[in-house]
Amino acid sequence: MPDVVAVTWGLGSTEEADELLTLARRCGDVTWLNLGQLPEGAVEAAARHGVTSIIQTNDPKLEQAGADATVEALAQYCRGASPRLVLFNQDFESRLIAPRLAGRLGTPVVMNALAVAIDRDETTVTASAFGGDTHAEYRLSGPTPHVVAVMPNAVSPEPAGSPTNPAIEQFAVDLSGVTERIRIVTPARTDGARLEDAQVIVAGGRGLGSSTNFRLIEELAEAVDGMPAASRPLVDDGWTEASRQVGLTGRITRPALYMALGISGASQHMAGCSAAKTIVAVNRDPDAAIFRYAKYGIVGDCLEIIPELIAAVREG
Amino acid sequence: MMRIVICAKEVLDSDAVNNYALAGRLTIGDDGRTITQTAIPRLMNAYDEQAIEAALRIRDTGVECTITVVSVGEDPSAILKHAAALGADEIAHIKLVDGETDCAGVAALLAAYIGTTGAADLILCGRQASDDDQGVVPALLGERLNTPVITIARDVALSGSAVRVTRVTPDGDAIVEADMPAVVTISSELGAPRYPTAARSMQARRMAPVVVTPTDLGLTTDDLTPRVMLEKLFVPAVQGNCEFINGASPAESARTLISRLREERLLA
């Protein structure tokens, strides 16, 4: 079985590794390499997912999650262990770390992966392209490890047929030669509520007509105790702030309920909300792509419907 | 004088590709991987255009700099002319037939170009190309040049010998700094790029790109052997299963929808 390394860091809970470990197991013999503190219940999660070994590394330089230390630690691990495939959860940080690791090792890399399969010396990766409406299949060959970053929600997590009893090993990295080249002047302000964690999201799109109507989205969001969000054109045009943008180049969300109002459902946007348990949509165009993803739909002008939705919620 | 190099890619207009894909009319050639619709325009990747804008804004602050825009491909002369019209001082074309290399090869070519033309203090790239969405070339280029790579910028400013970048992170904006040379990738949050002025467009018409080949840059076919091959492009099928609520009035539709969501305990 090929050696597959699932790389994680900064996990809030083991659930955030479920998809990656599921995919890794389907590709080969899994080593779970976690940089920094393992989340609670990691050993049980690893056993459930059929992981062979957990590699832990606790160098304090990795605690600040600087890109230079992270890439160097992973490169040292890969040079020593010579895995066949390295898998990342694709997120803001791994979007840089994965290709830099591949660049340092001189091995091929593909991002935005939806499916991965190993066939002898080659790896086949299906990835989203053109914002997601089109998929691309790539064949990776040459030096290993092949490096692949996997899109959120690409895989439905599933426990292994037979659980394992994973060994926990420490991996000692030597980061003495690493000085972070990027200095943080002002860290990002975390204002608590993040779209990524929201259970209910009310999102508006072009169908709102004008920027002043975005307050309808905010009002409905407040009424249903959810968070307001927007498609990219609204953010580009300054109707709301960038932190509200859902989509391929914005937030990747997975709420229980996603209300898409005046959103056409371009794949660029759907990449950020297709994992919602239930999508409901209001759109004037009965053929809008959003209705392909929605469980419930109303065909109509969202400017007429949203006030009625607010009223219906408040009626209780 | 400081040198800013922007790496730009010619792409198929992704909005047009998506419209064809959604309408079920995207045609792929016999090779299984080439979009054959000739009606789809070829444009400069929009993020790369914003990278040029970022460079122009630096120049607007009074920084003495030259701005070079370089593109790898068969014939990106149209987008290079556009770059010149926007205000590039120099345009360069690294000549390569499509499919002869992959992102790693493109990064090798760009690194060799920068290395053989007097280096660069600041290298700006779009955050990703809107065709393959890969976004790996800037990182690979940074590894080649051994420079820091700062991704997803909405603002780029100089501060002495350092570059100061406002990044759009999932937790909000963060401001970071790195000594130059550095690679910075530009995101859509930078804002709309300017339009070319008539005078600059006239000037640009007379500018010809500097054309170099991989051999000129000291790279062989072996160096450029693609390890990531595009095998297939396809439009995935999406199963629709939407239940439409057709109330007699907007109010009735809204009430039905909300009560449905409450029954399913999706709303309190």
Image: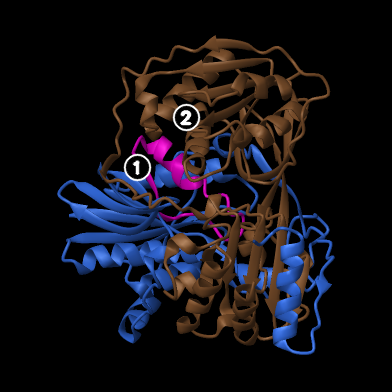
Chain colours: A brown, B blue
Residues marked 1 and 2 touching at CB (< 8 Å): no
Question: Can see residue A230?
Answer: no
Q: Please, what secondary structure does the residue beneath circle 1 have?
A: helix
- Count of numbered circles in the view: 2
Q: Is residue B142 above or below residue A34?
A: below
Q: Position of residue B214 (x, y in %)?
A: 50, 45
Distance between the alpha carbons at the discs numbered 1 and 2 = 18 Å
Amino acid at pointer 1:
Gly
Camera-side mark, 1 or 2:
2
Which part of the image, by quadrant, shows the N terminus of chain A?
Answer: top right
Q: Is residue A58 left or right of residue A24?
A: left
Q: Is residue A81 left or right of residue A211?
A: right
Q: Which mark is residue B115?
A: 1
- Look at the image and tell me in which quarter the C terminus of chain A lies: bottom right
Q: Which residue is mark 2?
A: A104
Of residues B235 and B168, the one drawn nearer to the viewer in this rendering: B168
Q: Nearer the viewer, residue B236 or A30?
A: A30
Please give the range of residues in magenta.
Answer: B125-151
Q: State the residue at coordinates (44%, 60%).
A: A243
